[in-house]
Amino acid sequence: MVGGFNAIYVGRTFNGFSAVYDQPGFSVTVSGVRPTQGNLTVQGQKEISGIGIVYAVLTSKKDSVVAGTEGRLYYLNYRDQRVSQVVDNRPLSARLQLSDEKLNIHTIGAHLLSL
């Protein structure tokens, strides 16, 4: 949804926090950030105050649960309070106008990696 982007002079950064709890068999990471404008402007460090991102992940380290395997369970929340419109492949007249509603997208996922 929102990622780092590096141009010639200025890249996108994130203002916020990140906390990590690390143990031999697992780790937990929680982050809350707001992106900066970055991209193609040298004045790009202004925070985009209408966007907030929360990320939490639980990682089981190699061999802690299943031999030769690492696992991850994650949650991501993207909240955009700016006036925007959903972009998809429906005709413009059928799309939801978001002038009164804000985006609040929740993503939950997991993966296993055999090492």
Image (cartoon, rainbow, N blue to C red):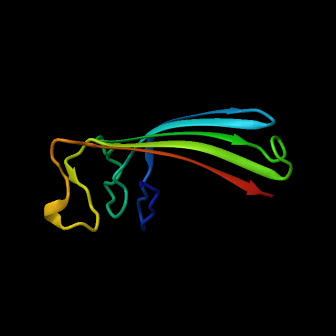
User: Does residue 23 sit above or below 103 in this rendering?
Assistant: above
Residue 43 in the image: state x and y as whole percent.
31, 54
- What x and y, as percent, mark residue 34? 39, 42
Direction from residue 94 to residue 39 in the image, left or right: right
Residue at x 23% of width, y 45% of height: 82
Q: Quadrant for the C terminus, please.
A: bottom right
Horizontal side of 65 relative to 96 (left or right) equals right
Q: In this view, does 97 lie above or below 40?
A: above
Please report the residue visible at 78 percent of the width from the left and 57 percent of the height from the top. 114
Give 52 or 13, whichever is nearer the viewer: 52
Q: Is residue 76 left or right of residue 38?
A: right
Residue at x-position 33% and y-position 53% = 37
Farthest left residue in view: 93
Q: Report the number of discs.
A: 0
Q: In this view, does 9 lie above or below 20?
A: below
Left of 107 or right of it: where is 68? right
**Residue 65, image quadrant:** top right
x, y percentage for residue 105? 38, 45
- Quadrant of the snapshot with the N terminus: bottom left
* Front residue (pair 80, 90): 90
Q: Residue 108: x percent and y percent?
A: 52, 45
